[in-house]
Image (spheres, grey):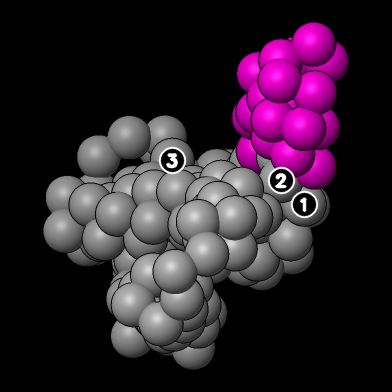
Amino acid sequence: MPLPPSNGAGPPQYAIQLDTPAFYILIAVLILFLLVLFALRARTASKRALDGFVEATGVDIAFIAFSILLVVYLALRFPDGNREAWTVAEVILGGYWLTFAIPIVTIGNTVHQKTRGAVAWRGSSIGVALVLFVVIFSLYWAYPSLV
């Protein structure tokens, strides 16, 4: 069976939907992180505690917020299917990419901050996360039945 065209409207199986448990979990995790951040800011005078929380979760919050915005954009822009958009949405909502990328970038960011940039791992860990995205995107693209 030949693959569908790579751009333009695709068959119904490439529709991007936001009413999935994975999307709601992403939103819930982002809200939870933000609630803890606001509660910590409001209830403690300890700048050290707030800095520690932001250091530990700042990259996670950014990754999750970007992922949510990207999936919403793709669903609005390509609701009836586009193979690239569907694959990107599945990589994010499938959870595999975030499962690996967030810890890698969190560790890289923490090492970078704790060493005050002497061990500059922030950029390289983001690079590793992008490579993981490309690898998982390629797998989903080549084998859509994995989803």
104 left or right of 81 in image: right
Query: 66 or 51, which lies in front?
Result: 51
Q: Which residue is mark 1?
A: 103
What is the residue that sits farthest to the front in this orientation? Answer: 45
Q: Which residue is mark 2?
A: 106
Residue at (69% x, 30% y) in the render: 113
- Mark in the foreground, 3 or 1: 1
52 left or right of 79 in image: right
Q: Is residue 114 visible?
A: yes
Residue at (25% x, 40% y) in the render: 8
Looking at the picture, does residue 75 appear above or below residue 113?
A: below
Amino acid found under the numbered disc labelled 2:
Thr
Q: Which mark is residue 84?
A: 3
Q: Quadrant of the C terminus?
A: bottom right
Looking at the picture, does residue 36 appear above or below residue 16?
A: below
Q: Position of residue 112 (x, y in %)?
A: 74, 26
